[in-house]
Amino acid sequence: MAAYRTPCPRASPRPSTRPPAAAPAGFRPPLPGESCRSTPAAQPRPEPVAEGAGLCRGPRLQVVPAVDLANLPSVLTQLQKDLEEVKVLLEKATRKRVRDALTTEKSKIETEIKNKVQQKSQRKAELVDSEKPAAVVAPITTGYTVKISNYGWDQSDKFVKIYITLTGVHQIPTENVQVHFTERSFDLLVKNLNGKSYSMIVNNLLKPISVEGSSKKVKTDTVLILCRKKAENMRWDYLTQVEKECKEKEKPSYDTETDPSEGLMNVLKKIYEDGDDDMKRTINKAWVESREKQAKGDTEF
């Protein structure tokens, strides 16, 4: 009798304690009817990126073609010819569509001519501005103005000469020394001398002068003003009319028709008013002695 061997049951595998491996990227489980071989899913193609995509875009700049200013006259001539021809065709055209197209073209040419003319005018203005000399800025005079009160004067047969002493005046530019003459006056202005300006105004000259013949000279530390006399060979006793009037007021007046003793008293009174303390004491002493003698009958005084 044949021995019967009972098949040994296959031992079941031990369960794994390891965590399942992560599926690769793009892996998907097979569908029914598909092979168990895993095939990675097709990767999507990247879409083509336009050049400059993803960059910050600002407003698009309009490119203006450069204008050849040297050829503007010839360009304008050609545009004028085109405009004349379009006008001739517009006069001959009878169809509405053709006339509309010619009218539009005519407007375009006229606008272009207008723009070219403006560019030409602007170019001329720029050339004129570039040819103008740069403005010369005068130096700003600092300091203050000093009034000149000390001077000397002299005269010849033709000129009255006024001498003004200013230290360093010969070292400044000649245009900084200005003199303005009129028939009976002159004024002197010296600018920016040692940080100051100096002025002298003389009005009411004693006699008229010649404006054209008068002048100035700058010498070492001195300004010489030459006033040309209108009446030559005539002597000036004073420089101004005011000076003459003041001097004449100071002179004592003698009236021959009045009592001589009264005139003498006026002279003594004038001397007393203008004299110092010692002069006044002397006059007072003489006056007292004179009164005492008159009281005694002695009239020697």
Image (tube, grey):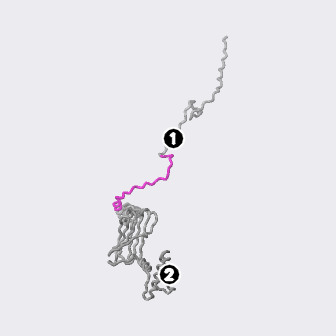
Please identify, in this view, whether the residue under mark 1 or under mark 2 is nearer the observer: 2
Q: Which residues are magenta?
A: 52-77
Residue placed at 43% from the left, 84% from the top?
254
Q: Is residue 197 magenta?
A: no
Quarter of image, res 39? top right
Where does label 1 land, which residue? Answer: 46
Question: Which of the two residues, 262 or 169, is positioned nearer the viewer here?
Answer: 262
Q: Is residue 124 visible?
A: no
Measuring from the top left, give residue 1's x and y in whole percent.
67, 10
**Element type at marker 2?**
helix
Q: Position of residue 271 (x, y in %)?
A: 46, 79
Q: Nearer the viewer, residue 228 or 83?
A: 228
Residue 176 position in % (x across, y down) = 39, 65
At 42% across and 55% down in the image, what residue appears? 64
The percent coordinates of residue 256 (x first, y second) are: 42, 87
In the rendered view, tell whether residue 163 sits above or below residue 231. above
> Residue 217's quadrant in the figure?
bottom left
Residue that mark 2 sits on: 289
Q: Is 240 left, or right, of 30 in this rendering?
A: left
* Residue in the image at 56% along x and 34% along y: 25
Judge by depth and name the residue closer to the eye, 128 or 293: 293
Magenta span: helix, strand or loop, mainly? Answer: loop
Give the crowd class for mark 2: few <14, some 14-19, many >=20 residues within 10 Å.
few
Residue 62 within the magenta-colored segment of the rendering: yes
Distance from the alpha carbon under mark 1 to that under mark 2: 141 Å
Q: Is residue 56 above or below residue 137?
A: above
Looking at the image, how many numbered discs can be counted on the residues?
A: 2
Q: Helix, strand or loop at disc 1?
A: loop
Whether 173 is drawn above or below 266: the answer is above
Q: Amino acid at mark 1?
A: Pro
Q: Quadrant of residue 244?
A: bottom left
Residue 280, numbered label: none
